[in-house]
Image (cartoon, rainbow, N blue to C red):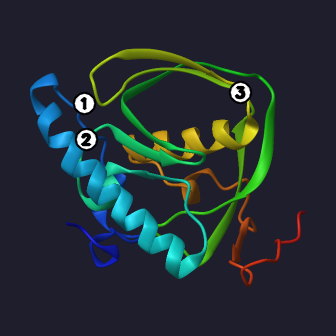
Amino acid sequence: MKHLADLLLLGDPRLYETCEPVLESELPLVTGWVADLHNVMEEIRAKYQFGRGIAAPQLGIMKRLIYLNVDRPQVIINPELVAVSDETDELWDDCMSFPNLLVRVRRHTKLTMIYRDEHWQTHTWEVTDWRIAELIQHEYDHLNGVLCTMRAIDERAYQWRPTPGTNPKTP
């Protein structure tokens, strides 16, 4: 079982690599990978009071796998963004791989994604909830070796995480 100490941190070269697709023959491994992702997310939540999603490469699993747990656990295998809205919005993004840093980024407000679930069933998901759309884009970026630090809106788009329960000032 992987733990918080196994989480790759900002600067680890593996965070900048593009992940390989999960193969159908690797499906038996997905259960263990998801258990590791879930465990580390729970440890992040306990320590830092945030965490809605985590991508496999954050634990050194260089596969196109995302685990979300917003209202319920959800496994996303080999996601493909097939459409994004023209409309965008800004937010202070956070990341488990640098938990004390917030980065101001711009993300699409809606998207359509095709992916497989843990049973290898194909799904098309039209995401219209901004909170979920920006989360998926963040995790999807991880699969392509892109961190939110690379999407900062400008050179002043960084700040330390405020005390839990408070919100950062918006520009």
First in residue order: circle 1 vs circle 3: 1
How packed mark 1 is, by other alpha carbons closer than 10 Å (few <14, some 14-19, many 20 or more), is: some
Q: From the image, tell me which residue sits under label 3.
A: 110
Q: From the image, tell me which residue sits under label 2.
A: 63
Query: Mark 2 to mark 3: distance in Å?
Result: 25 Å
Give whichever of 19, 135 is nearer the camera.
135
Q: How many marks?
A: 3
Query: Mark 1 to mark 3: distance in Å?
Result: 24 Å
User: Which residue corresponds to the image point at 43% horizontal and 47% vertical from the top-left?
Assistant: 142
Give whichever of 21, 40 is nearer the camera.
40
Q: From the image, tell me which residue sits under label 1.
A: 21
Q: Is residue 26 left or right of residue 75?
A: left
Residue 76 image point, x, y percent: 40, 34
Q: Is residue 98 visible?
A: no
How packed mark 2 is, by other alpha carbons closer than 10 Å (few <14, some 14-19, many 20 or more), is: many
Say above or below: 90 vs 3. above
